[in-house]
Image (cartoon, grey):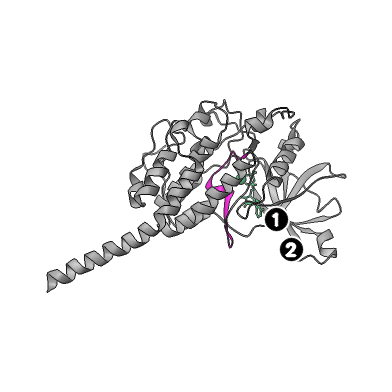
Amino acid sequence: MSGRKPGRKARRKSKRPSSAALARPITQSPAQGGHPGAGRTPGQLPELLCGRYKIERLLGVGGMGAVYRARDLLREVHGEPAAHVALKTLSSEFAEHPDANSLLHSEFSLTSRLHHPNIVRACHFDLDPASQQAFFTLELLKGSTLDQLLDAYPSGLPWVQAREIALPLIDALIHAHAHDVLHGDIKPGNILLCEQGPILFDFGLAQLDESARAGLPQLNRQRFTALTPRYAAPELHQHAPLTAASETFAVACVLFELSCGRHPLGNRDTPERLADLRPLARLPRRAARCLGAALDSQPQKRPSLEELSDAFRKSSRKVGLGGLFRHWARTRRHDANRS
Ligand SMILES: Nc1ncnc2c1ncn2[C@@H]1O[C@H](COP(=O)(O)OP(=O)(O)OP(=O)(O)O)[C@@H](O)[C@H]1O
Ligand SMILES: [Mg+2]
């Protein structure tokens, strides 16, 4: 590898692998590669599923499956206005896995538990009898992922706008946790910025909180235990179970990136060293302090999501008026010097 750092866009691309690229046993280091999703194309899908969903086009391919835009012919017959859906399937490779359909259903079921304006809505799970292809449908979202937004704003968003994304996003996560759902893969590529605000989607690696899991049959997640290293809290790299605190770390990485235009780990893939918090200086002090704490390597030192939200919410007026005041004071000094 040459000593030159790749350009920002290239770096973003190379450093933002989908969990796709990382759908690997957690014990395998990224350097070991050999992930099952690599170089995969979506499997062949019939044009019509269950006689109801007519596939129109591919919307995106992730680590384990593919998402298509489809027409819901049943809704159309009844003249329903939103007759288009997003339809998610597993790739043929993952479909071979013993628990594949159950895992897809788990994603559907966990998404279905959640009813929040900033979380994608799941509609319907089914198995196409002819092709034996399991799939589920979701509300069709229109927008760009935060990944794409970050490419358009390489220095990060102005505070007011970053905060407008942060607050509903944290709120969505608080809602999920209140319903015992841990998302498991919070990253810019799994958040779409739509007209109605940021929408959290892709619960493919989501899990029920440990307390809610008790007594339920456990799925064989071995091949699916994946993480996206750059957003995974340090304890997850040490094989600790997913917790609300690890989600706080992941969302803090996203918010740091949104407001500072760079990832707190720099170009590194794993948090082997402390995050570089210096860019936080451009944020209002209270928000900066809380976001910095949310990136602490020790989960027990991280603030709760409620505290993070509070810090962002309460920082709003101060930055607006503070900035205005500083500008006004500078102008007055300037005028005084002139007279
Ligand atoms: N409800 C939706 N509406 C519109 N597009 C969607 C929707 N859900 C997913 N997509 C598109 O499909 C892509 C892949 O979806 P998703 O992230 O759910 O798949 P995945 O296989 O779990 O991905 P990865 O493992 O890479 O995170 C998204 O990046 C997005 O472009
Ligand atoms: Mg995804």
The answer to which of 156 and 24 lies nearer the viewer is 156
Residue 147, position as x, y percentages in the image: 52, 51
Q: Is residue 208 visible?
A: yes
Q: Quadrant of the N terminus?
A: top left
For residue 270, above or below residue 119: above
Whether the residues at callouts 1 and 2 have beta carbons within 8 Å, the answer is yes
Q: Residues within 10 Å of mark 1 (few under 14, many from 20)?
A: some
Check disc 1 and report its element: helix, strand or loop: strand
Amino acid type at circle 2 is Ala
Residue linked to disc 2? 82
Indicate if the residue with disc 1 has its beta carbon within 8 Å of ligand 1.
Answer: yes
Residue at 47% in and 32% down: 299
Q: Residues within 10 Å of mark 2 (few under 14, many from 20)?
A: few
Amino acid type at circle 1 is Glu
**Horizontal side of residue 281 vs 239, given as left or right:** left
Residue linked to disc 1? 139
Q: Quadrant of the C terminus?
A: bottom left
In the figure, residue 53 lies in which quadrant?
bottom right
Indicate if the residue with disc 2 has its beta carbon within 8 Å of ligand 1.
Answer: no
Residue at 68% in and 31% down: 213
Check disc 2 and report its element: helix, strand or loop: loop
In the figure, residue 108 lies in which quadrant?
top right
The answer to which of 225 and 299 lies nearer the viewer is 299
Residue 102, position as x, y percentages in the image: 76, 36
In space, the residues marked 1 and 2 are separated at their CA atoms by: 9 Å
Q: Which residues are magenta?
A: 181-197
